[in-house]
Image: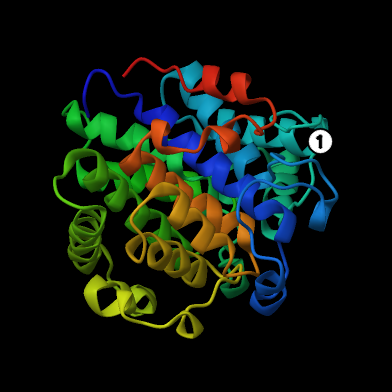
Amino acid sequence: MTENTNIWLNGIMGVVVGDALGCPVQFETREEVARHPVTGMRGYGTFNLPEGSWTDDSSLTIALLESIRRTGKIDLDDIMGNFMKWLYDGEFTPYGKSYDIGRGTMQAINRYRKNRKAKKCGGDEEWNNGNGSLMRIMPACIYCTVMETSGIYSDRDAIDAIHSVGGLTHAHIRSNIACGLYFFMVKRILLGEGSLHERMQEGLSQGFTFYESYLADKENLHYYDRLKDLDSFKSLPADKIKSTGYVVDALEAAIWSLITTISFDQALLKAVNLGDDTDTVGAIAGGLAGLYYGYDSIPEEWLSAIKRREWIEDMCRIQE
């Protein structure tokens, strides 16, 4: 992390741009998207919204970012307060109204509204393994990386924090692991050297090593075994990659899109053209791509379309 690089701007705008690229074709099959491939920002489609519109992925990412920015820490109750403002009041949205709301996320926020127990509101059943925590975890990953480089956090402290933030809505250990592996990739992209592929591999290897000792039961870690060797994973054809709302599929699709391309725009177009949960796969891939390639690598015509761009970018001005 250099003094002249705003890592928050890189990562958050990567998430938002990926989300907005995928928004118009969300829920379309791969075959349907292939008939009119995404080549840049466009409007309408699934939600009948103008180009540059972003969805719940970005809203919840920005809600988390705003809490960290204002409080200077990870405060679970404050974060859930922001999530309630998003769901019930339309804050942190492009148009003053929440939309594209995942079932698990809605249920968790409703539970918190009733009992005000942040550590108890996330669902931990098998079906609570949607990608709704992974899609918004970037601000926590950046924060924890900063805390580690400052000598305040250890890896265990960071993962405990990541799990707590992800678990606000999706508390199953499999979803927690996805967020944790994402954190290790974020950290190595920011602190490592070499190509994006090399940094992601190093991050994943560190993540798997950590979880081997952190977890008493490794069953849920094995769902991510295909990510242990990115050289092998990279060679898989597209028909072996799923891009559904299941957290394992979404993480795999994002990573595959990143390691089979060589630029920000290539990676995101590949991600959203996989079809299905396009906004979220785009957001997950976009965050990592933004951190590695940088804000200046994002096409200006994409950035200029982003709704409330200046407001989001101002939110990213956090003292590092």
* Left or right position of 212 against 9: left
Q: Nearer the viewer, residue 304 or 138?
A: 304
Q: Residue at x 71, y 66 (%)?
A: 36
Q: Residue at x 33, y 63 (%)?
A: 259
What residue type is disc 1 on? Answer: Tyr
* Pointer 1 residue: 88
Q: Position of residue 300 (x, y in %)?
A: 53, 32
Q: Position of residue 108 (x, y in %)?
A: 67, 51
Residue 154 at least partly seen: yes
Q: Position of residue 60 (x, y in %)?
A: 61, 40
Residue 117 at least partly seen: no
Q: Residue at x 59, y 35 (%)?
A: 301
Q: Nearer the viewer, residue 72 or 235?
A: 235
* Left or right position of 156 against 299: left
Q: Nearer the viewer, residue 158 or 53?
A: 53
Q: Quadrant of the N terminus?
A: top left
Q: Residue at x 23, y 18 (%)?
A: 3
Q: Quadrant of the C terminus?
A: top left
Crowding around mark 1 (Cα neighbors within 10 Å: few <14, some 14 to 19, many 20+) is: few
* Left or right position of 254 against 82: left
